[in-house]
Amino acid sequence: MRNLEHKLSVARGEAPAESLFQNAQLVNVFSGEIYPADVAVDDGRVVGIGPYEAREVVDLGGAFLAPGLIDGHFHVESTMVTVPEFARAVVPHGTSAMVIDPHEFTNVLGKEGIQYVLEASKGVPIDFFVMLPSCIPATHLETSGARLHAADLAEMINDERVAGVAELMNYPGVFLGFASELEKIRAGKGKPIDGHAPGLRGRNLNAYALAGIRSDHESTELEEAQEKLRLGMHLLVREGSTERNLEHIVPLVTPQNANNCSFATDDKLPGDLISEGHIDHSIRKAISLGLAPITAIQMGSINTARHYRLRNHGAIAPRYWADFLVLDDLEKFVVRRVYKKGKLVAEDGEYRGPEVAAVKQPRNTMNICFRGADDVAVAAKAGKSIRIIEIVPEQIITNSVTVPAKVEEGQVVSDTSRDILKLVVVERHNATGNVGVGFVRGFGLQRGALGSTVAHDAHNVVVVGVDDSDIVAAVATLQKMGGGQVAIDSGREIAALPLPIAGLVSDRPLPEVVDKIEALKQAAASLGCSLPAPFMSLSFLSLSPIPALKLTDQGLVDAVKMELTSLFVD
Amino acid sequence: MRNLEHKLSVARGEAPAESLFQNAQLVNVFSGEIYPADVAVDDGRVVGIGPYEAREVVDLGGAFLAPGLIDGHFHVESTMVTVPEFARAVVPHGTSAMVIDPHEFTNVLGKEGIQYVLEASKGVPIDFFVMLPSCIPATHLETSGARLHAADLAEMINDERVAGVAELMNYPGVFLGFASELEKIRAGKGKPIDGHAPGLRGRNLNAYALAGIRSDHESTELEEAQEKLRLGMHLLVREGSTERNLEHIVPLVTPQNANNCSFATDDKLPGDLISEGHIDHSIRKAISLGLAPITAIQMGSINTARHYRLRNHGAIAPRYWADFLVLDDLEKFVVRRVYKKGKLVAEDGEYRGPEVAAVKQPRNTMNICFRGADDVAVAAKAGKSIRIIEIVPEQIITNSVTVPAKVEEGQVVSDTSRDILKLVVVERHNATGNVGVGFVRGFGLQRGALGSTVAHDAHNVVVVGVDDSDIVAAVATLQKMGGGQVAIDSGREIAALPLPIAGLVSDRPLPEVVDKIEALKQAAASLGCSLPAPFMSLSFLSLSPIPALKLTDQGLVDAVKMELTSLFVD
């Protein structure tokens, strides 16, 4: 610690503190109490609790002073904005530290993606800690921008901003004891290893825990969460934009087990950050469901810090960072002011923190070899049906459905009358020329095409469209923009969100991104799309680990058998 | 982990487990629940919870199955027996892991003392973790057998059996920011740093916490403990042989803060291990004071494991060591059976674990240069009074009292009529020839002498006696025994406990040691001694950091001013 000797003299009362937060109702997450106290701060840290001399006094007038909040598991790419823009949105909601998994950046950029997010977070009034992505690529059935092996994790694990190994999504690989997965756990060298085991129960869950997995954020039902908690897994109660599990899991939390529970958001759309907030939203919701405010605050602060060994975060006590929220009412939990390392960084919902310049963008990641119409044409096979992907609204699973093909001039084509549209995935990292072509039901487009370079997990170019020319135009437009999302009508771009940073993230302010997302949604609707979140649905159609049928640059994936399959059914 | 792949197949139910603990009421310290369950064990670890096939089935008939217990802070030298003998005594009480501070061994033997205790604990059915002694020697006013600097700690800290840095007893040095002490904290490299701050409150306590101290076991009053807890210090609630703080501190524990509280014993006399037990005693006492059994058990297991990052101890869940207690009644908490790594090691109070051979004893540590009567004679100074040490019964503090000297033939001598006896400290590590001579009130001896090489913290030879010839005989006897405790009457040994291991620990079985301690006490009483624990009182008369007046090999120590002082008062 910088200037510890001086800070000790301040703590002893021999020199004035930089500032004193006076007349607070201190929310003490260690003792579980709330009581009147003053808090002395020097050089960004709490140095003492009690009456102290200080050069600046902040009279809190009896307001509550709580520790800054921590998100225990987050993919910052889901916000589609840069780290400083993300911070601008969530700092007013009290977020002071983040445990992030830069899974998307890393799929595209490899280790450079981890370095980028660490660089980009320097200077923002939120401390970022990285869990090292453990499943790059997600499967062998798609082409990502990078591969990360256990040795890569081992190389980075000792960095002090690296908190552990991120979600082991290949959970069958773990409980089946695949050497590659067990090596990734060992690469954690004793740091926390995050789990990801949706619906895993019983013996296989025991095996997953036995392998060394000590957390999970995928529980959607109370019984599932209870089983994981009983096996010693820290519960990250998730309340994100799409996955909303808090209501189902919070009833499990008791004072006797709460220290094994934290809050996380996983993925959060930019609009939701503005409309509902962040971890403060989880706390409010938990309190409204009957959890004691002190317990909810512990879950949003010290419990997470402890689990991830963030030794100076999540509490208001000597040596801890002076990350504070000021609140008038603990039950309502509306954050009035936010301090980061002792400095005011937000007030009444407005960001007041430092203006942090964007760091140098990573290299252009649009490296495409695409020959246009020839690449997306599908020659019909006489008398054969096709298997198509059927969207399950608001879920990432899909159905596999067999239907008769519509054939024109010897080609299988979209059939808007049955809502069967062509789906194309173009590899964009290594100019392999890989193009996967299939068909999908559920978008409802009557004309045009929708395209995106956000396409989990490999983030290749994915386009759905009625006719080939619009599909080709979508690919060309995305390439020109350096990645992004686009809606095409009759060869013309009618809405677009450029995402020049890895094809995942905008370089523009968050409100502008929110507007463009809305414009894209409107454009999709104008083309006939009936889905509530068409670009999100599109982005999950390549996610090869998730059943039942997906499309990657390598072709159609039977995600139950985990193998490539053919469009045509015998 | 050894054979992880095989254990995973057992967890998946594809191969039989080694053993199944069936029909248990599982005490789950994560979920805070108690419920019926079966526990499968393989190769020493829990591999699964639930119905499993196993080669051996242990039917628990509905008894409670709780995790093995952990002592959060202990000086194993206080038992005066070797580690295997200690284990034999406490394993039947459910102790499965220890966090020890080999402070006494290290004062005598230096780093060799740490290695010795690590070696000696191999193979015993208790896992030992070492906190590195941080205050060797205790002060500059005594001569110990070794000096440990921050660099020595840094050299050993990465050992996997080293859990952190032991109690920073020089707490003023810490809160005043002495470089030597702050360096010791930095040498911890992020591992836990134990505190030791009896009675420290207010600003100086804030400074102590600010320096990085995150635990304390010295609180004797509820308000003191509360203040420490509020500042983020893990409370090790102490219930040892002499310091019994549990009753005063347990009322502070609530479900909202219990995870910041653990049990510890600090020092435990061999007789007490037999008569009352160990951490099970703390749990029983806490329950009798109204604490919920589940909370008390958490304090005796997982809370301690978490604080010291013992990642596979303190709970019954996959990957954790299969360290179990079987109990018929949680409120009464009488341990019926104990399993260590899945093997029965105690039943109905009887040790059933492996017979562990003693390791090679450390070198003889009695390295004395003593010239006999000449060294202990005190020439009187005409008209001058003397300052004497006055014992405060059952406390380690002393008073400093000024009295007229009794002079015979030009020498200051003992005066049994006023209970003023000669006290001698002979340096025993480096044959320096240092001998400190003073006088003490409180023993009540009418004749003879009592001597000990257990003499905190430097463990030199300390002898109290009526006349010089018996004092000299005591020193000679202790030297001949290689260290120990002795009672002398008229030049003859009337009781003795040899402590050949570092002058601190016997090589004999615990019951024999208990008998000899009792014999020594009887012998002291036969010489007129009125103290309840004369050898313990004797052992603290050299403890130079503790006020008011002490005697070391360097002479009388004014332990308030922390400087040497003279026998004679002007």
Image (cartoon, coloured by chain):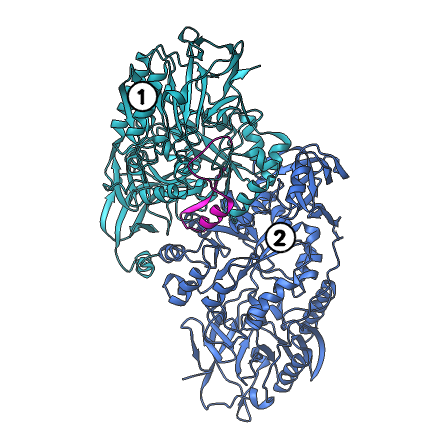
Chain colours: A cyan, B blue
Left or right of A8? Residue B311 is right
The residue pinned by badge 2 equals B97
Q: How far from the left and from the top, in percent, is residue B240? A: 59, 57
* Residue B172 image offset from top left, x and y in percent: 40, 64
The magenta stretch spans which residues? A141-167
Q: Chain of mark 1?
A: A
- The amino acid beneath tag 2 is Ala
Is residue A121 positioned above or below B554 on the image? above
| Image quadrant in which the C terminus of chain B is located | bottom left
> Residue B450: which quarter of the image?
bottom right
Percent from the top left, x then y, of residue A25? Answer: 34, 40
Which residue is depicted at the point 51% across and 21% down?
A549
Residue at the far top: name it.
A417
Crowding at dot 1, Cα within 10 Å, few <14 / some 14-19 / many 20+, comes out as: many
**CA distance for labels 1 and 2:** 67 Å
* Mark 2 crowd level (few <14, some 14–19, many ≥20, 10 Å Cα): many
